[in-house]
Image (cartoon, helix red, strand yellow):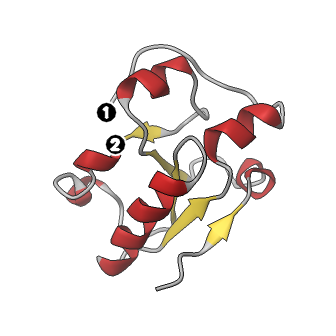
């Protein structure tokens, strides 16, 4: 199965309210994440899949793109329209996009 992918430039251009799931660990998320990203660590995705919307495209991000590609592949298999963010949070930060730091919610 091929996982659809966008880059961080495309992610930054998405409309407000787009669903973004960050699959990194809580400590990574706290250090810096894309504004609006919801934390569901990769290890929790299977058991928390029912928390992920099925009526819209879901964008999945990690630090570099590997973990999010795995998560997006799983979500696609569940019938969820999932898209991997290539380059991940590292590329987002390198592109000078805004970052939120602080407590992990989710």
The residue lying at 72 percent from left, 39 percent from top is 92
Q: Position of residue 3 (x, y in %)?
A: 53, 76
Between marks 2 and 1 in the image, the one whose residue lies nearer the viewer: 2
- Characterize the local packing of mark 2: few (<14), some (14-19) or many (20 or more) Cα atoms within 10 angstroms: many
- Of 37 and 93, the residue lying toward us: 93
Q: Are marks 2 and 1 in contact (CB under 8 Å)?
A: yes
* Mark 2–mark 1 distance (CA, rounded to whole Å): 6 Å
Q: Position of residue 90 (x, y in %)?
A: 67, 37
**Residue 106 — which label?**
1
Which callout, 2 or 1, points at the residue further toward the start of the chain? 2
- Of 41 and 48, the residue lying toward us: 41
> Going by the picture, which residue comes out furthest to the top?
102
Query: Relative to 15, is 82 above or below?
Result: below
Query: Relative to 86, is 105 above or below?
Result: above
Taking the image as shown, residue 7 lies to the left or right of residue 96, namely left
> Going by the picture, which residue comes out furthest to the bottom?
1
The residue lying at 73 percent from left, 32 percent from top is 93
The residue lying at 31 percent from left, 33 percent from top is 106
Judging by the rendered image, the residue that carries numbered circle 2 is: 40
């Amino acid at each position: 199965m091929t996982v659809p992918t966008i880059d961080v430039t495309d992610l930054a251009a998405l409309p407000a309210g787009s669903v973004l799931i960050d699959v990194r660990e809580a400590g990574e998320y706290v250090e810096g994440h894309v504004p609006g990203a919801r934390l569901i660590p990769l290890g929790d995705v299977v058991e928390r899949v029912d928390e992920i919307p099925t009526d819209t495209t879901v964008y999945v991000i990690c630090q570099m793109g590997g973990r999010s590609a795995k998560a997006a592949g799983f979500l696609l298999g569940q019938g969820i329209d999932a898209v991997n963010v290539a380059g991940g949070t590292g590329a987002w930060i390198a592109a000078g996009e805004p970052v939120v730091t602080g407590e992990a919610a989710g």
